[in-house]
Amino acid sequence: MDIYEELIRERSEGRACALVTIVNTTGSIPSNSFAKMLVREDGTIAGTIGGGAAEGRAIVAAREVIAEDRPRLLSFKLHENPVMDIGMICGGSLDLFIEPITPPRRIYIFGGGHLGLVVERLSRSVGFSTVVIDDRAEFACRERFPEASMVLAGAFDETTRGLVVNSRSLVFIATRGHFFDAEALSWALSTPAGYIGMIGSRRKVQMTHRRLLESGVPQEQFARVRAPVGLEIGAVTPEEIGISVLAEIIAYARGATAVQPLERHMSEYMANGSRRMEPGEAIHEENRGVA
């Protein structure tokens, strides 16, 4: 198997991986001195650096490198640790460089209206790959989104077919109506997307939650949904709300835990009996027809 072809395949499908390269050795090893191994997120590999306990340790380290998105130099002084000298080197040392291969995160934006337009532009500005989906061709078109990776117009059940979604994928929902919100959220919950966020008022969240429950979506699935989405920055305008939304998405992508979301999960929001107005909520409700 050509590990470079496999690397390209993983990257094209939006999955992170790591490339492990032998950069220095002393002693003899049962492999090329500069052998490479590709490690996928799930720990499966392509290629080999010679097998043995050192390779097993390298796979564990590579998965950590993928999670941290930071390269690492891993050294084995096998003469000091005979346990690691299994199937690799008779004494000596081995240095590995582990490099994360991290494709841009892809964000699926449901709704090509004023907020979708802002979020798409902001998402590209921080390096995300963007896909815009709207049932209206006049809102999902290249004239509005000339630099998006994909622009899809049509019924959601048709346009979402064949989309490749993985745990690094992001979903943002800001459609023009409650029915479409529920349809987009139902699709998102059927995928392994790591982040799912939906804009909206308490009424919108309640209606969408009830509609999906009645359709058979298990209650526990709603813990995956950030609704209403965004950080509490007092946002009012579409531009400010877009910044609030993207700030939360960046916090998620970077693993930041100190930030304060409007509500952490949709299920928690539904359980909270107090009335809480989302930034710009009145604007959203007044302009549902042009979202």
Image (cartoon, rainbow, N blue to C red):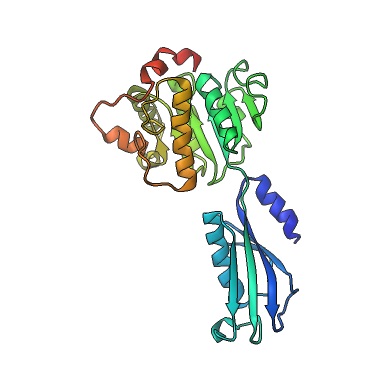
Residue 12 figure quarter: top right
Q: Residue reaching furthest left? A: 274
- Where residue 162 sits: x, y (%)? 63, 37
Q: Is residue 188 above or below residue 55?
A: above
Q: Quadrant of residue 96?
A: bottom right
Q: Is residue 275 left or right of residue 158?
A: left
Instruction: Locate the N terminus by quadrant.
Output: bottom right
Can residue 173 be seen in the rendering of this structure?
A: yes
Q: Residue at x 73, y 75 (%)?
A: 31
Say left or right for 63 vs 6. Answer: left
* 79 up-or-down from 64: above or below: below
Residue 64 x %, y %: 52, 61
Numbered-mark total: 0
Q: Is residue 99 above or below residue 90?
A: above
| Residue 135 location, quadrant | top right
Can the viewer see residue 111?
Answer: no
Q: Position of residue 93 (x, y in %)?
A: 64, 80
Say left or right for 223 vs 67. left
Residue 146, position as x, y percentages in the image: 67, 24
Q: Residue at x 62, y 17 (%)?
A: 137
